[in-house]
Amino acid sequence: MGPYERRSAILNKIKKEHSVRITQLSHDFGVTRETIRQDLYLLDEQGIIKKVHGGAVDRPVMEDEYEKRATQHQKEKLAI
């Protein structure tokens, strides 16, 4: 399994379980803990997950006020 497939599988696991541990991921994927740490740091930098001590958690999706307003009343905005 390559790094892209592994990161995708890590994301799926986090979405399903809401949190993961580095040691368990290392065992599941047969790679070192450092490899998993690097994957988690990369995913955290991309804003997809939140890296925490010993693992990672699902980052809650929060729309800010601008994003909410930008998606509301789209037909009317296009008409204007």
Image: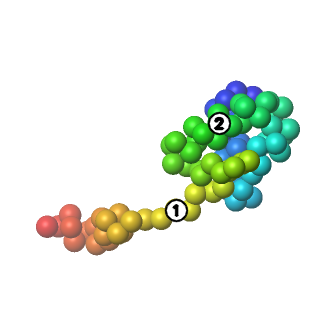
User: Relative to 46, is 38 on the left or the right?
Assistant: right
Q: Residues within 10 Å of mark 1 (few under 14, many from 20)?
A: few
User: Relative to 1, is 24 on the left or the right?
Assistant: right
How far, Cα to Cα, is label 2 from label 1?
20 Å
The colour style of the image is rainbow
Residue sitting nearer the eye, 26 or 80: 26
Q: Is residue 71 visible?
A: no
Amino acid type assigned to the residue bearing label 1 in the image: Val
Residue 48, given in percent of the width and then of the height, sits at 55, 49
Residue 20, given in percent of the width and then of the height, sits at 75, 51
Tell me where residue 64 sits by quadrant: bottom left
Residue sitting nearer the eye, 6 or 44: 44
Amino acid type assigned to the residue bearing label 2 in the image: Asp
Please, what secondary structure does the residue beneath circle 2 have?
helix
How many numbered marks, from 0 up?
A: 2
74 above or below 17?
below
Name of the residue lying farthest toward the top: 2
Residue that carries the numbered disc 2 in the rendered image: 39
Q: Earlier in the sequence, mark 2 or mark 1?
A: 2
Residue sitting nearer the eye, 18 or 4: 18
Residue at 77 percent of width and 34 percent of height? 33
Residue at 17 percent of width and 67 percent of height? 79
Residue 40, given in percent of the width and then of the height, sits at 64, 41
Q: Is residue 65 visible?
A: yes
Mark 2 and mark 1 residues within 8 Å of each other at the beta carbon: no
Residue at 35 percent of width and 69 percent of height? 65
Residue that carries the numbered disc 1 in the rendered image: 61
